Amino acid sequence: MTAKLLYEKRGPVAHLTLNRPDKRNAVDIELHDALCEAWADFRDDPELRVAVVKGAGGNFSGGADLATHAPEWQNEGPMIGRNRLEYGLSGITRGPLSRISKPIVASIDGWCVGHGVELAMACDLRIATDRAQFGTFEVRRGMHPADGGIVRLVNTCGVGFALELLLTGEPVSAERAHRANMVNRVVPSGELEEQTDLLVAQILRCDQAAIESAKETVLEVVGRTLHDQLRIEAMWGYALDGANPAVAERTQAFFDRVDPGRAGTTVNPL
């Protein structure tokens, strides 16, 4: 695997670090290929439960590396859209790797713009520092997002906020992104690693089968009618209740007030 991506396994957690700090971790073709390989390994390794993706050198990602991608896009011709339907840039933005059922966390510092936004929005949870900035600058270059940037902004943040980013080409602060539900948490810049580890620990205390089923249910219900959404949730949820052997043990731990990280007056450490 290329040095442009650092891929490390620490117990049940996969850590992916975009490692092109001199290019603000812009995703070129080589980095895209490495990300696809790493996501597939994360999906297929039964020992891995959560993935964290971040950028090296104080930035998350400056987007797609136009020096490598733009000539390819121009030379491919009018069939480029159809030819790319089954896979997205950076792997998880579209296609089979976008349906990984394990949780993925984006840990964001500095600039997260262009395709960096698409990669972050393709993750399940996003934690950002108070110095992070977000923007979709493609319209300045005669383009607009094509790897989930529009769809996920609309689905997660709403039409108004998505249009502001997409039509102005101006960045927004981490705090503004937080108010728009673009990021889940904003933390001081010196605490990003610590707070990311805490978020991962909160995920890991939960039952893996339940987490994966919940994520799959969310992906399945998006865009459907309310009637179908409710039926799918009930079908998947009750099927899990009846099939998951961990339910009895974890329920008893709840009754005995010894479940880890218990909310309320008897909090236990994670």
Image: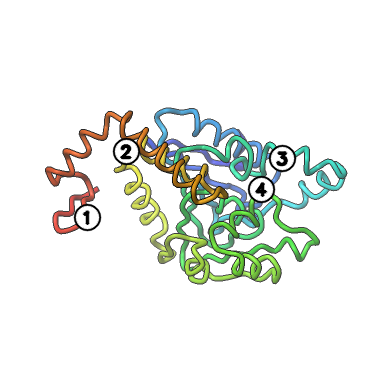
Identify the disc placed on residue 207.
2
Identify the disc placed on residue 98.
none
Query: Which callout, 4 or 3, points to the residue nearer the camera?
Result: 3
Badge 2 crowding class, 10 Å Cα cut-off, few under 14, some 14 to 19, many 20 or more, is: few
As helix, strand or loop, the secondary structure at mark 4 comes to: loop
Tell which of 59 and 45 is nearer to you. Answer: 45
Compare marks 3 and 1 and give the one earlier in the sequence.
3
Residue 239 x/y as whole percent: 37, 33
Quadrant in the picture for residue 5: top right
Residue 67 x/y as whole percent: 78, 51
Instruction: Name the residue tied to disc 3.
Output: 85
Label 2 – label 4 distance at C-alpha: 34 Å
Question: Could you tell me which residue is drawn at 66 percent across and 42 percent down?
Answer: 88
Label 3 – label 1 distance at C-alpha: 44 Å
Residue 229 x/y as whole percent: 48, 46
Q: Type of residue at label 1?
A: Ala
Which quadrant would the N terminus be assigned to in this image?
Answer: top right
Identify the disc placed on residue 27.
4
Instruction: Name the residue tied to disc 1.
Output: 263
Badge 3 crowding class, 10 Å Cα cut-off, few under 14, some 14 to 19, many 20 or more, is: few
As helix, strand or loop, the secondary structure at mark 3 comes to: loop
Residue 146 x/y as whole percent: 71, 51
Q: Type of residue at label 3?
A: Leu
